[in-house]
Image: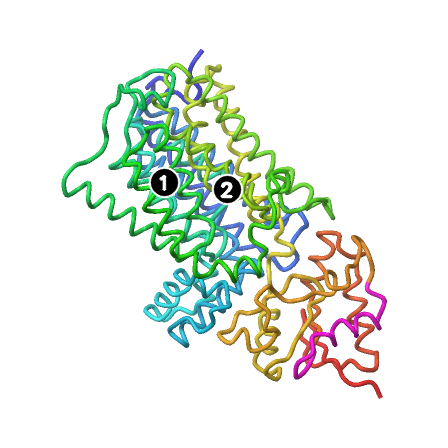
């Protein structure tokens, strides 16, 4: 019997060392082949994994096999193990950008529009735009675009890869503070990479997560207090502590760095600062970090920034209008409209719940040395307090996972290194478990590729609409999946900060319904008023409606054909993916 993933005997070490990089090299070659033949134009309802060449699957498996074999071969982490982690990050987060001409996800384009606005105006111009109320990320990206000459769309396209590479660096620095076991560090890093759902598009949340990692790194570097053994992590409260608090000038630098990063975060994202406060408060209350007054100071910073904006946010977004623990934990979809959606939802939820279950098992198995697991144990589960907060539309559980996943990964790695299995079963089991984990993460990130992938022609149609529609015009979407607001003057038309209206929601079409009442459609589009009224229908909206079961298959395609022949509607713009109709007076 041998420990799972423990080093094997050094027999024939030299030949094995020379061959150790073969799986990684083969994985890279297989990935390049997958990119060479890849085509996302017709995405499967099962997302990236159902669309891309099998060579991509082979590449991922080879990376994991190579990592496990190298992990067993060495007694300390090696550069080759790190190379496997980097390769996995690139394959997970660089594949879609490499195969797409424009960024993934419709909501990315709204963020691009704010960046372009700051590029043109250089300042906040509208105090009723939530993006401009929390402007830091957009201003920084605008500065980066101006400095490099790279268009914001190109920056947004490659942001997932760049962000995850940055996450990897900071996470590794954090893991080095949690343990001196380099093998545990690199294993936890791989697991964190494989279960990491954030970092998929240009967003304030991604930026805030990077700042969160920086804050917690500084806490571990200078403010942590470590219990002297025992089963209770909170034993610090009653004494028996090895102080980790730095003194003198370094102490001031650590505190100043935390305050600075938090201040930037407060102006970048609405929710993340309060999750950071939850984490820090949990550590402070249990005596795992000092000084406690730091939480109060940071809390005052958060409230001071939010207070002038509270009235508008509360009235516009129904803040504090109710508390719904079950709804917060239920996810974003109360029902599933297609097999692909159900598959992705089950995969992601299984990964999250399974990971938390393994983390709890790790804490139980390590109960005799809880002091060593105190910090990751607390940080893995402190974010659950968010579920008790304001109703968050089913997305709260994913925010909890965002803040929990790193620490959960560390606990899983600790558990894995203590499991005893026969050698062959250990290797095979490790590869299968890692592959399942990575597959679930990919389904969470790119399982909806059929609706999240957009074509340049859609962007061309949207930009034509913004450039040529009379100021003050309004438009309605067939369904909520269009690349709107990617231009600097995104509020020139459809002046509505809550989003663009859609027929499916505006007409309260039942799940799996139809769009055959042309009079109702006309009335709803006309209600928008303004200088002119438009209806936008695209192939992507059709895919979106079918994926989520909003309409019977083919409804938007049929509507497009019908309206082209219906008096009172004019085809104002059309290309191979999108048609824009203008409402005209009936004669």
Q: Residue at x 42, y 28 (%)?
A: 377
Q: Residue at x 35, y 65 (%)?
A: 144
Residue 55 appears in the figure? no
Residue hosting label 2: 59
- Residue 541's disc number: none
Residue hosting label 1: 171
In magenta, the rendered stretch is 515-533
As drawn, the residue found furthest toward the top would be: 1
Quadrant for residue 353, please give it.
Answer: top right
**Could you classify mark 1 by the number of other residues whose Cα lies within 10 Å: few (under 14), some (14-19), or many (20 or more)?**
many
Q: Nearer the viewer, residue 95 or 110?
A: 110
In this view, 344 is above or below 135: above
Quadrant for residue 77, please give it.
Answer: top left
Q: Magenta includes 521?
A: yes
Q: Residue at x 38, y 29 (%)?
A: 70
x and y percentages locating residue 179 in the rendered image: 31, 28
Please indicate whether residue 41 sits to the left or right of residue 407 in the image: right
């Amino acid at each position: 019997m041998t420990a799972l993933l423990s080093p094997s005997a050094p027999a024939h070490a030299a030949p094995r060392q020379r061959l150790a990089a073969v799986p990684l090299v083969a994985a890279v070659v297989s990935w390049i082949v997958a990119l060479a033949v890849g085509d996302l134009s017709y995405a499967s309802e099962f997302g990236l994994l159902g669309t891309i060449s099998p060579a991509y699957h082979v590449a991922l498996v080879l990376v994991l096999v190579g990592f496990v074999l190298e992990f067993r071969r060495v007694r300390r982490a090696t550069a080759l193990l790190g190379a496997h982690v980097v390769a996995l990050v690139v394959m997970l987060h660089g594949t879609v950008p490499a195969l797409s001409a424009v960024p993934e996800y419709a909501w990315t384009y709204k963020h691009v529009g704010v960046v372009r606005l700051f590029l043109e105006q250089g300042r906040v111009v509208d105090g009723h735009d939530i993006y401009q109320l929390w402007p830091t990320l957009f201003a920084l990206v605008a500065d980066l675009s101006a400095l490099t000459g790279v268009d914001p769309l190109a920056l947004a396209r490659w942001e997932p890869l760049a962000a995850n590479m940055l996450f990897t660096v900071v996470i590794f620095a954090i893991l080095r503070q949690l343990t001196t076991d380099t093998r545990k560090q690199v294993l936890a890093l791989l697991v964190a990479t494989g279960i990491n759902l954030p970092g998929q598009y240009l967003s304030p949340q991604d930026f805030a997560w990077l700042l969160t990692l920086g804050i917690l790194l500084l806490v571990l570097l200078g403010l942590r207090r470590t219990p002297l053994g025992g089963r209770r992590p909170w034993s610090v409260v009653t004494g028996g502590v090895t102080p980790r608090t730095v003194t003198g000038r370094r102490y001031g630098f650590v505190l100043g760095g935390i305050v600075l990063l938090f201040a930037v975060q407060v102006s970048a994202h609405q929710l993340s600062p309060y999750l950071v406060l939850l984490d820090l408060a949990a550590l402070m209350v249990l005596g795992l970090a000092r000084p406690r007054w730091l939480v109060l100071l940071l809390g005052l910073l958060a409230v001071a920034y939010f207070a002038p904006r509270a009235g508008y946010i509360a009235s516009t977004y129904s803040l504090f209008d109710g508390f719904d623990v079950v709804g917060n934990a239920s996810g974003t979809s109360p029902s599933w409209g297609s097999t692909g959606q159900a598959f992705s939802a089950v995969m992601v939820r299984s990964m999250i719940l399974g990971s938390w279950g393994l983390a709890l098992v790790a804490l139980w198995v390590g109960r005799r040395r809880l002091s060593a697991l105190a910090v990751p144990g607390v940080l893995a589960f402190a974010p659950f307090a968010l579920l008790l907060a304001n109703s968050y539309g089913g997305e709260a559980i994913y925010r909890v996972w965002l803040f929990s996943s790193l620490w959960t990964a560390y606990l899983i790695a600790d558990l894995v290194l203590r499991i005893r299995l026969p050698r062959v079963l250990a290797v095979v089991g490790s590869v299968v478990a890692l592959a399942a984990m990575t597959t679930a993460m990919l389904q969470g990130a790119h399982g909806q590729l059929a609706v999240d992938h957009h074509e340049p022609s859609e962007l061309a149609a949207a930009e034509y609409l913004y450039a040529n529609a009379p100021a003050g015009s309004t438009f309605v979407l067939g369904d909520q999946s269009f690349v709107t607001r990617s231009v600097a003057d995104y509020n020139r038309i459809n002046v509505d900060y809550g989003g663009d209206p859609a027929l499916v929601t505006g007409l309260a079409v039942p799940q799996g319904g139809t769009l055959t009442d042309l009079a109702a459609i006309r009335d709803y589009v006309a209600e928008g008023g303004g200088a002119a009224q438009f209806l936008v229908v695209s192939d992507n909206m059709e895919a979106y409606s079918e994926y989520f079961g909003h309409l019977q298959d083919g409804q938007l395609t049929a509507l497009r054909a019908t309206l082209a022949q219906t008096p009172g509607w004019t085809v104002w713009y059309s290309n191979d993916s999108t048609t824009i109709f203008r409402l005209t007076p009936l004669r």
